Image (cartoon, rainbow, N blue to C red):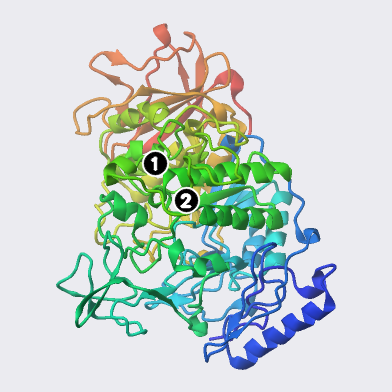
């Protein structure tokens, strides 16, 4: 195991690279860093570790004393020149990167590295920058990178390599590099026409404090608490939910609310959170671990399982600080969007305040068309869409809780805070289309269920997601910016075929190829999880977070070549990016005796304009066609129009019959992309 470099915790540019840094302050910072190194602390922050207008943090001496570095702030000259790099987000192809697992370009930050799946593996921003040509060849145009801020190093036997255990919102994660390397990555990506999206967390911090339930001042792993599991021992790090707040209890009985105690363990970066606002107990809901997400109080106010402490996001000081922190990271890096974690665990009115204020602040700096989309990990389509619709009440949970969610110091009006602009219904620009993940990619493409469920899901899109663009946003309604995905870091990979997975009914790779065709042809923004192009097949976390370097970055892999072809087709045929979408055939039939079993067909664009017809056979074993019981699929195309399957080796053609009828017959687990003959692009 390698020791950390002396500047491992640097959040901004080194002192020597920062114009105008006072020499005395730089020297003080150097002395502070040297002190921390001498003390043996694994995670010290170097000069310039704090963001502009936010408190600087320090390193902790093993004896618990604070060795505070000089309170340095970034100069205006440290800011990146902000610009809008996107014209239409529907034209982008997003690639999800788990930084620790993608590429190791800088061995100097490889401390705590271990081959265990739940440990740090050594990937960093330099590694991603070095591999941009690989992604450019694949056809990627936007990078969604895992969270960048400083995290808890390790907890309960697992490392914070993923980035979702924030300790310091104002400092960069030293495992991944410093600000200079992050900015080089963003600039290099922009130089290749690629955009960069930061992953952020506002719902919780890492496990940085414990509830002192028995009032003895130290964490205990087996005591009797006041919450759900009163008859069983609980851990003071992660006690069960109590709607009153976690309660103290001694041998003499109940003792009121349990105080929280912040941890001081430098070796694992279990230190009081930064900025200093988050060292105040009242900025947390302090109700303990949620165990029932159908209980709205637990969903919104409970700690995330594993001891991730829930922040009281109804407070104005919290809202303002979250805006300040993440706007500042955009100012320093010129990134193009935010992917937001655990959205459904935060009040709707927070998202209105956050998104509207971020947009206004960035617009003043010249950053427009900034895309903010969120993770609502749920299968309920209407619930997912509630975070993009403008007509949802700012406090939709109030009725379920029988009261007002607002706290002391929270907004007096819906979403508003003193001195802030009035809040409208504008909210997130988009969300991950999780309902489609379940109903299409899992149920249909993997498990070969009826395709009618896709048509029924799509029929609810406008109602559930909304048709109004956000002011100062992407210029597109949320229904047009749904982020489509086959799998990601929170679910087993599509190709996983181990314990707990339903067995494939068809060749797994053929099923994935069909799913990828659907992904890159449908309306919305496609998002590909790293490693899909190399046939990765890991199960649940952390098995689905493999090292990409194990693949050798093989550009000849059949799936790499398939994705490369599909991204080129999506970019080449405008109907596939911006065309309207209509279902032309779906079926509930999945047996072995009907003509259309497993067929799904939809068109993009308009007859007479840019146009594409996509036909998929998801049946695992039989040829099927776009006909049944004497009925044939119809379109609005002129009779006589010739359609060319640009995916077939021989460029198979189909002629449109009377009433726009088109019959397409396909082998099992295959698809066709039909383009009018006069629109076919040679060479694609």
Q: Nearer the viewer, residue 406 or 632?
A: 406
Above or below residue 570? Residue 498 is: below
Image marks 1 and 2: residues in contact by CB distance under 8 Å: no
Q: Residue at x 50, y 20 (%)?
A: 643
Closer to the observer: label 1 or label 2?
2
The local secondary structure at tag 1 comes to loop
The local secondary structure at tag 2 comes to loop
Q: Which of 357 and 655 is in front in this view?
A: 357
Q: In x, y percent, where is residue 645?
A: 49, 28
Left or right placement of residue 50 versus residue 147 in this view:
right
Which quadrant would residue 204 be assigned to in this image? bottom left
In the orientation shown, which residue stands out farthest toward the left? 231
Q: Mark 1 points at which residue?
A: 395
Numbered tag placed on residue 410 in the rendering: 2
Above or below residue 450? Residue 47 is: below
Q: Residues within 10 Å of mark 1 (few under 14, many from 20)?
A: some
Q: Which residue is drawn at 38% across and 78% down?
A: 157
Q: Is residue 648 visible?
A: no
Q: Where is the C terminus found, in terms of image quarters?
A: top right
Q: In x, y percent, where is residue 132?
A: 65, 56
Left or right placement of residue 282 versus residue 197 in this view:
left
Q: In x, y percent, where is residue 331?
A: 70, 54
Q: How far apart are marks 1 and 2 (CA)?
A: 13 Å
Q: Is residue 20 visible?
A: yes
Left or right placement of residue 28 versus residue 454 in this view:
right
Q: How crowded is mark 2: few (under 14 residues within 10 Å), some or many (20 or more)?
A: many
How many numbered discs, if any?
2
Q: Residue at x 57, y 53 (%)?
A: 320
Numbered tag placed on residue 101 in the rendering: none
């Amino acid at each position: 195991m390698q020791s950390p470099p002396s500047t491992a915790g640097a959040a901004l540019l080194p002192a020597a690279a920062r114009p105008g840094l006072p020499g005395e302050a730089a020297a003080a910072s150097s002395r502070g860093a040297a002190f921390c190194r001498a003390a043996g602390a694994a995670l010290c922050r170097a000069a310039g570790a704090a963001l502009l207008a936010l408190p600087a943090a320090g390193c902790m001496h093993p004896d618990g004393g604070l060795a505070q570095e000089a309170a340095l702030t970034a100069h205006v000259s440290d800011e990146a020149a902000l610009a809008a790099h996107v014209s239409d987000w529907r034209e982008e192809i997003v690639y999800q990167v788990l930084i620790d697992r993608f590429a190791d370009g800088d061995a100097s930050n490889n401390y705590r590295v271990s081959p265990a799946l739940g440990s740090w593996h050594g990937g960093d921003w330099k590694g991603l920058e070095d591999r941009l040509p690989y992604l450019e060849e694949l056809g990627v145009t936007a990078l969604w990178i895992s969270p960048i801020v400083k995290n808890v190093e390790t907890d309960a036997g697992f490392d914070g390599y993923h980035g979702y255990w924030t300790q310091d919102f104002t400092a960069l994660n030293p495992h991944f590099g410093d600000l200079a390397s992050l900015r080089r990555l963003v600039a290099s990506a922009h130089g290749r026409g690629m955009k960069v999206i930061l992953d952020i967390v506002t719902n919780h911090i890492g496990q940085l404090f414990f509830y002192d339930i028995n009032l003895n001042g130290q964490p205990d792993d087996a005591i009797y608490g006041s919450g759900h599991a009163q008859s069983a021992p609980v851990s003071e790090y992660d006690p069960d939910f109590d709607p009153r707040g976690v309660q103290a209890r001694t041998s003499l009985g109940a003792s009121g609310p349990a105080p929280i105690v912040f941890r001081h363990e430098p070796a694992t970066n279990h230190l009081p959170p930064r900025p200093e606002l988050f060292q105040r107990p009242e900025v947390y809901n302090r109700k303990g671990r949620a165990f029932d997400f159908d209980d709205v109080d637990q969903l919104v106010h409970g700690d995330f399982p594993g001891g991730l402490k829930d922040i009281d996001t109804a407070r104005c000081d919290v809202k303002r600080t979250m805006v300040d922190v993440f706007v500042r990271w955009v100012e320093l890096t010129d990134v193009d969007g935010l992917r937001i974690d655990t959205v459904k665990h935060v009040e709707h009115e927070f998202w209105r305040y956050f998104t509207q204020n971020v947009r206004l602040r960035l617009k003043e700096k010249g950053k427009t068309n900034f895309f903010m989309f969120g993770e609502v990990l749920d299968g309920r389509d209407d619930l997912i869409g509630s975070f993009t619709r403008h007509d949802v009440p700012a406090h939709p949970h109030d009725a379920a809780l029988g009261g007002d969610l607002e706290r002391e110091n929270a907004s007096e009006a819906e979403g508003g805070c003193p001195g802030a602009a009035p809040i409208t219904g504008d909210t997130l620009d988009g969300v991950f289309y999780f309902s489609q993940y379940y109903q299409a990619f899992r149920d249909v493409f993997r498990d070969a269920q009826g395709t009618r469920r896709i048509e029924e899901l799509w029929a609810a899109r406008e109602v559930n997601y909304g048709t109004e663009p956000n002011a100062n946003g992407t210029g597109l309604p949320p229904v047009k910016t749904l982020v489509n995905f086959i799998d990601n870091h929170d679910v087993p990979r599509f190709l996983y075929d181990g314990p707990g997975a339903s067995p494939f009914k068809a060749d797994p790779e053929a099923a994935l190829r069909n799913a990828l065709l659907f992904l890159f042809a449908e309306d919305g923004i496609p998002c590909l999880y790293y490693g899909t192009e190399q046939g990765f097949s890991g199960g649940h976390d952390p098995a689905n977070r493999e090292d990409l370097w194990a693949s050798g970055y093989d550009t000849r892999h059949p799936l790499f070549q398939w994705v490369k072809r599909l991204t080129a087709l999506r970019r080449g045929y405008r109907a596939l990016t911006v065309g309207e979408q209509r279902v032309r055939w779906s079926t509930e039939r999945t047996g072995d005796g009907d003509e259309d079993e497993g067929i799904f067909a939809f068109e993009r664009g308009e007859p007479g304009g840019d146009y594409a017809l996509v036909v998929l056979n998801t049946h695992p074993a039989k040829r099927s066609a776009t006909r049944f019981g004497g009925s044939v699929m119809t379109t609005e195309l002129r009779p006589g129009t010739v359609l060319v399957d640009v995916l077939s080796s021989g460029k198979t053609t189909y002629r449109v019959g009377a009433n726009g009828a088109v019959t397409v017959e396909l082998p099992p687990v295959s698809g066709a992309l039909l383009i009018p003959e006069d629109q076919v692009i040679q060479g694609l």
